[in-house]
Amino acid sequence: MKITVNGNDFYYRFDGPKDAPVVMMAHAMGTSHRIWDWQMAALTDRWRVLRYDWLGHGDSAAPPGPYSLDGFVADAVGLMDALAIPKVHWVGISTGGMIGQGMGIAHGDRLQSLSLCNTTPQATPWYREWVAERQAVVRQDGMPPVWDMTKRLWFTDAFVDAESLAYCVIRDVFNATPIEGYLGGTSAVADLAYRDSLDQITTPTLVLAAGADPVTPLDHSKTIRDRIPGAKLESLPGQRHFSNVEQPDAFNAILTPFLESQR
C-alpha cells in the first residue's frame, strides 16, 4: 500500500497479527523492505511488522535530491502519524540504523525499543570519498556496476559465489533502485553526525554487529554501545554487512529475544 507523507508517496506493508505490538523495520541503502524478508517468519507470529521503503528507494517516491537524515527521520515519524501508531519497536540496518539513531535522539517518546544493526554513528573522510566514488559510477553507468564493485562488502565471498536465491533477490532490488533515490540517499548519509548526541538516547537499545563488516566495522558498533546508556552489543563473527540475509537464523536468534525482553 502507499500513503502520502510530507508531500511524497511511501510504500508500506503490514504483516502479522493486527492486535500485536508494532515492529517498524527500515532497510539499507540501495535496497528496500525486501531486505527483511528473512526475518518475517521469526517475527510475524507475535508481532505486527511494519516495513516501508524510505525516500528514493523501492516503490516509494524518488524525487530529485538533496535528501537528509533529518528528512528521513521526519518521514518515519510522519508515516507513524499517518497510520495512527503511537510507538514502535524500531529495527534498522545500515542506513535504517542511522535513521533509528535519529529517532532515538529526537523522538525517543515514539520508541519502545531500538535495534541498530550493522550501522555507524558518524561519517568519516573515507566514507565521504567512498560515497563520491559510487555516485560517480551511478551517474555514468547506472546501478549494476555499483553492485559489482560492492557485493563482496555486503556478503562473504562464498555467499556471492554461490548466487543463492536470497543473494539474487537483493542484487535485483539493488540494481532496480532509482538513480535519483540512490544519489539523494548517499548524499544524506555522507553528512551523518550522530555520534556526539547518542548519549541523549534513553530507549532500550540493542546494537547488532557483523564481525567482519568492512562497511561498518565492529569498532563503530562498540562506539554506539558505549555512548548509549545501557545499550547491549551482540556480534555475528565472520559476517559482512547484510548478515541478516546471509545468516538469518543466527541474526534472528539475537534480535527476537531482545524484542521479547522489551515487549
Image: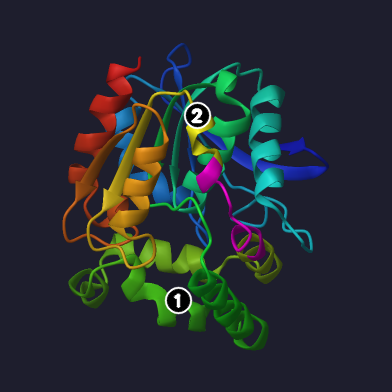
What residue is shown at x 56% (from left), y 24% (from top)?
108
Q: In this view, does 164 lie above or below 50?
A: below
Percent coordinates x, y for residue 123 in the rendering: 53, 61
> What residue does disc 2 label?
201
Q: Does the rendering let one see residue 245?
A: yes
What residue is shown at x 67% (from left), y 57% (from top)?
56
In the image, what residue type sits under mark 1? Trp
| Count of picture labels | 2
Q: Is residue 46 above or below residue 196?
A: above
Q: Quadrant of residue 99?
A: top right
Badge 2 marks a residue whose secondary structure is loop
Q: How far apart are marks 1 and 2 (CA)?
A: 34 Å
Badge 1 marks a residue whose secondary structure is helix
For label 1, the crowd category at 10 Å Cα-Cα, with few meaning under 14, some 14 to 19 and many 20 or more, is some
Q: Nearer the viewer, mark 1 or mark 2?
A: 2
Q: Does the rendering let one see residue 45?
A: no
Percent coordinates x, y for residue 74 in the rendering: 70, 37
Placement of the N terminus among the 4 image quadrants = top right
Give 37 or 98, whichever is nearer the viewer. Answer: 98
Left or right of residue 176: residue 166: left
Left or right of residue 249: residue 129: right
In the image, what residue type sits under mark 2? Ile
Q: Disc 1 or 2, which lies upstream in sequence?
A: 1
* Magenta part of the chain: 187-196
> What residue does disc 1 label?
147
Q: In which quarter of the image is residue 233?
A: top left
Q: Quadrant of residue 75?
A: top right
For label 2, the crowd category at 10 Å Cα-Cα, with few meaning under 14, some 14 to 19 and many 20 or more, is many
